[in-house]
Amino acid sequence: MRRLVRGPTAVVGLAILAAFVLTAVFSPVVSPYDPTLQNLEARLSPPGSEGHVLGTDRLGRDILSRILYGSRLSLLIATSAVLISLVLGVTLGMVSGYVGGWVDDVLMRLADVQLSMPFILLVVAIIAALGASLTNTILTLGITGWVIFARVVRGEVLSLKERDFISAAHALGSPHWRIMLLHLLPNVAGALIVVATLQMATMIIVEAALSFLGLSGVPPEVPSWGQMLADGREVLFFGGWWVATFPGVAISLVVLGINLYGDTLAEALDPRSR
């Protein structure tokens, strides 16, 4: 824990990430207004207007409240997608690295095929085929994000399975599943935590992009950062610059905080840095 907060970069990243999580959890408490409440008399009120710190959108909805509630959706989608990718990627990567042979060849060629396609375009194509819904968005992001976890786990397992403690486990008659779960998985956990943290930032950006394009399946009445960017684009050149600016700043800050914290985790969990 001391290593995780020993520098200004770590403190800033952790503070931003903690604020993001707390905002998502307690948004009903800290939000000044209902994010769906419309007030056409106060439409496009600039930042600093009475009762609206960040202004309002074209329907008179409070920007600050919508940003606070939008963090819940981003956290839900990003966390769910990363967990799916983590489970799928760790399973396939562990099997690929430990078994080797034709199994390794098939799984890694499948990974190469997926990596040859741009991630966002692949996600958009799948969602367009399946239909836009929140469930389909989470499943698509989760299933298409397994490659990076699988490659990290495979690389670590290829190195670890030649170590003496794995040979000793084989000599003692440990079954393969026990070796993978109790001997290999704990030794790759540090790298997985770092990758999962950084993947959270990627998923937040992709979810915002899908919402911006109207492909995330999020209902119009549910606040979403990407949807707010799309709404702000329509009034950007008519004086309503704040409608799109503040959601964009929120996305940038969250991604920055996650990346800073991910770098700190990588250093703290790397034995070579001690």
Image (cartoon, rainbow, N blue to C red):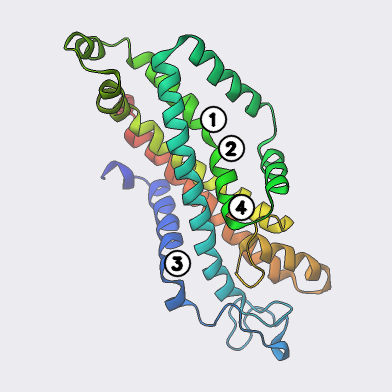
Residue 152, percent across and down? 46, 26
Answer with mark 1 or mark 3, whichever residue precedes in sequence.
3
Quadrant holding the N terminus: top left
Residue at the limit of the structure toward the left, as seen here = 172
Q: Which residue lies under the disc numbered 1?
A: 147
Answer with mark 3 or mark 4, whichever residue precedes in sequence.
3
The answer to whether one can see residue 128 in this image is: yes
Residue 223, percent across and down? 60, 69
Q: Amino acid at mark 3?
A: Thr
Instruction: Tell me the distance, in whole angstroms, between the alpha carbons under discs 1 and 2.
Output: 7 Å
Crowding at dot 4, Cα within 10 Å, few <14 / some 14-19 / many 20+, comes out as many
117 relative to 175, above or below: below
Quadrant holding the C terminus: top left
The residue lying at 68 percent from left, 26 percent from top is: 116
Instruction: Name the foreground residue: 240 vs 168.
Output: 168
Q: Amino acid at mark 1?
A: Val
Q: Amino acid at mark 4?
A: Glu
Q: Are marks 2 and 4 in contact (CB under 8 Å)?
A: no
Q: Which residue lies under the disc numbered 2?
A: 144
Q: Are marks 3 and 4 in contact (CB under 8 Å)?
A: no
The residue lying at 51 percent from left, 82 percent from top is: 32
- On screen, residue 102 versus residue 272, left or right, reads right
Which label belongs to residue 23? 3
Instruction: Tell me the distance, in whole angstroms, between the alpha carbons under discs 2 and 4.
Output: 13 Å
- On screen, residue 179 versus residue 157, left or right, reads left
Q: Are marks 1 and 3 in contact (CB under 8 Å)?
A: no
Q: Are marks 1 and 2 in contact (CB under 8 Å)?
A: yes
Residue at the limit of the structure toward the right, as seen here = 237
Q: Amino acid at mark 2?
A: Thr
- Secondary structure at badge 3 equals helix
- Secondary structure at badge 2 equals helix
- Secondary structure at badge 1 equals helix
